[in-house]
Amino acid sequence: MLKRILLGALAALTVTSVAFAQSSVLPYFYNSSNVKVPVGSGNPLPVTGSFSATLAGFAPNGNYGTLTATAASSVSTSLPAGEVVALQNTSQTVDVSCVLDPTSAVATTNKIVVHRDTTQFVTVGLNTKVACINQTGSASNLVALMGGTGLGTNFGAGGGGGAVTLASGAVASGAYSAGSIAAGAVVAGAFVDGADLTQGATADAVCATATGTCSVVSLLKYLNSAVNSSIPAGTALIGDVNLRQGGTALSATNGIYSNLLQGNAVISATNGLYNNLLQGNAVISATNGIYANQLQGNAVLSATNPTFAAPIPTTAGGLSVYNVQPAASDNHIVIKAGAGQVYKIEAFNNSATVNYVRLYNATTGFNGCNSATNLVWQGIIPASTSGAGLSSSWDSGMAFATGISICVTSGYAQTDTTNATASALIVNVGYK
């Protein structure tokens, strides 16, 4: 009996130990609240530290190959050795689709698409074969294969010679900042003839009208044609070479004066231009000449009071004349003891010595040839043994408020008193 109990206990212990040994043991950690929690998706194990990685660009290893894609799958071609293989589509116009396989590859469209003139990098893994097919078209397109290692950085023309289509509004207003396109960025020939439909092409036909919906080139051709065309004949003034008055060409019977009006009537032989010219509120005529109201001496000019009335010689009036033949002195003398005006002076000399004459605003008692005080005028009497002289006149007169006095000497200074040359000089002064 005891033996059975011992065997039962041993069996139970063995089962319990096996069950415990097969149970999963979860790791625990203490979170930020110092609570022991099991590691799980909701309680990830916190890890801190520094991590770094180096990514190297693709480096060819010298293993190469090619295949030709057409409308049908190319033959299954061995991949060149390398962890990474570059698939380079050399076509400028057609995209290709490639498929990799461990044993034998058959290409179908829309798999690994390698756009025209671009390169696609793939990690080989267990694959050893590749095949490619055109996405569209039946042309034969060469696909170059390169083996190597590293991160594929891609290269190519991003579409190469193929067209690029931008959706409407793809380039926003203000997309190009000031100076963003450098001088010479667009070289000659970058834009082919007709590239801009708005500007047009050189072969565009002449626009039918000036307001037609045409390219700029077409409109320029229209304008050039219009400028070089003859002015059309007709009633339009631009084509009428005649000067017109009142819509009728000027002629012998439609003179340029015919529509000139005076007093609301056309000027004519019976309505002359002078008819309404007034003088003194009366029309100018043969009996009311244009001089009728011109005044002289507060009297109207007339046959008895003409404009020449003042210059007529008379037996009264005129200038007073002082005449002297200077002696060997300063010849000072008062010509007029009171206010007056000098209108003319003459002086003659038949000697070889230059002499001088001076006029002063001075009256009775004058003896001031040695002073420039009150000096008004001074002149040179030229010298010549055959006779010489001076003559000066003033139509409105030269005023002397106090008196008119004179000096004649042979010295130049305004205060000179050197004797004049005797028996050689004549001086005349006209005054009022």
Image: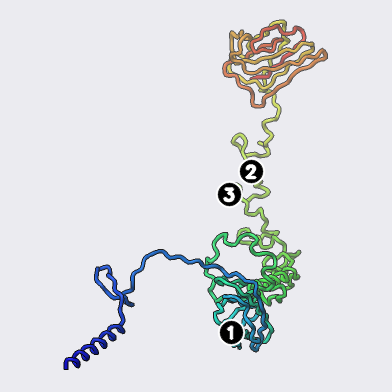
Q: Residue at x 16, y 94 (%)?
A: 1
Q: Which mark is residue 54?
A: none
Q: Position of residue 368 (x, y in %)?
A: 61, 9
Q: CA distance from mark 2 to mark 3?
A: 12 Å
Image quadrant where one finds the C terminus: top right
Three-letter amino acid code at disc 3? Asn
Q: Residue furthest toward the left? A: 1
Residue occupying image coordinates x 65% and y 72%: 62
Query: Which residue in the protein does label 3 denote?
Result: 281
Choose top left, top right, bottom left or bottom right for residue 238: bottom right
Q: CA distance from mark 3 to mark 1?
A: 118 Å
Residue 99 - label = 1
Which of 180 and 53 lies nearest the eye of the viewer?
Answer: 53
Q: Which residue is mark 2?
A: 292
Mark 2 residue crowding within 10 angstroms, few (<14) / some (14–19) / many (20+)? some
Q: Earlier in the sequence, mark 2 or mark 3?
A: 3
Mark 3 and mark 1 in contact? Answer it, CB < 8 Å: no
Looking at numbered disc 2 in the image, what kind of residue is underneath it?
A: Ala
Q: Within the image, what quadrant is residue 255 found in?
A: bottom right
Q: Nearer the viewer, mark 1 or mark 2?
A: 1
Residue 184 sits above or below residue 133 on the image: above
Q: Secondary structure at mark 1?
A: strand
